[in-house]
Image (cartoon, rainbow, N blue to C red):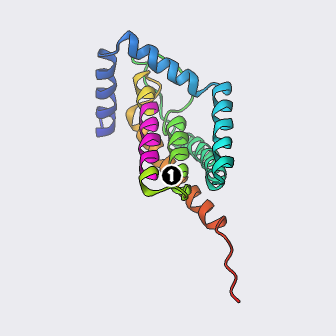
Amino acid sequence: MGVSEWLDEGLLRFVDAHRTSWATGGANALMGIGTSAVALAVLALLAIGVVVARREYRPAVAVPVAVIASTVVAAGVKQVIDRARPPTDLALVHLGGAAMPSTYAAATAAAAAAVVVATTSVTPRWRLLGGVVVAAGTVLIGCCLVYLGVHWPTDVLAGWVLGTAVGSGAGLLSQSLMQPSRRSG
């Protein structure tokens, strides 16, 4: 047994032994909200409102690009790695398909990184606060995925790494493409 298998199984067995009804209910509710089309539509409308009110258009470009790109890349990597999900005796939620990297973890990390990198009109203090908030949300979702037994911990970690890289790239790309033009003359 390799280090990642030992770590993954040990952590998931620890989580399984310490699950509580309130934490299970909370994790299920959070995952239900996160996969709800209505909740995602409301979040998108709120984001559009903030973008228009602040006239900060970079995140409006960077976030969808980051989420779509990270989802596509994660799906491709899953096909190559083809890692099985945790066994049914450790899982409260059963999904099909390959596990690594976690697409949810990749997409949330990509969105978070894209927002932080692409948002330049706020003070460094607000940018740091925003970064902490979106990072905390990303970690919470990843922990729910492990808690519910949908993914091994290293699936989530791989998703975070992939998503952060893709989201940072999308944020930087939106900055460079949406810079005010400088004419020499």
Decide if residue 7 is in sight here: yes
| Picture quarter with the N terminus | top left
Give the vertical position of 170 relative to 133 (above or below).
below
Q: Pick whichever, 142 or 131, lies toward us.
A: 131
Helix, strand, or loop for circle 1? helix
Instruction: Tell me what residue is drawn at x 39 percent, y 10 percent.
Output: 21
Decide if residue 155 is in sight here: no
Q: Pick whichever, 98 or 120, lies toward us.
A: 120
Q: Pick whichever, 128 or 88, lies toward us.
A: 128
Instruction: Tell me what residue is drawn at x 53 percent, y 35 percent.
Output: 104
Query: What residue span does the magenta drawing correspond to?
Result: 127-141
Q: Main secondary structure of the magenta part?
A: helix
Please tell me in which quadrant of the rendered image residue 154 appears.
top left
Instruction: Tell me what residue is drawn at x 68 percent, y 25 percent.
Output: 38
Give coordinates of residue 66: x percent, y percent.
60, 49
Give the vertical position of 185 relative to 117 (above or below).
below
| Picture quarter with the C terminus | bottom right
* Residue position marked by numbered label 1 in the rendering: 116
Q: Count the numbered circles shown.
A: 1
Instruction: Tell me what residue is drawn at x 45 percent, y 50 percent.
Output: 126
Q: Pick whichever, 94 or 113, lies toward us.
A: 113
Give coordinates of residue 50: x percent, y percent.
63, 44
Any magenta on residue 80?
no
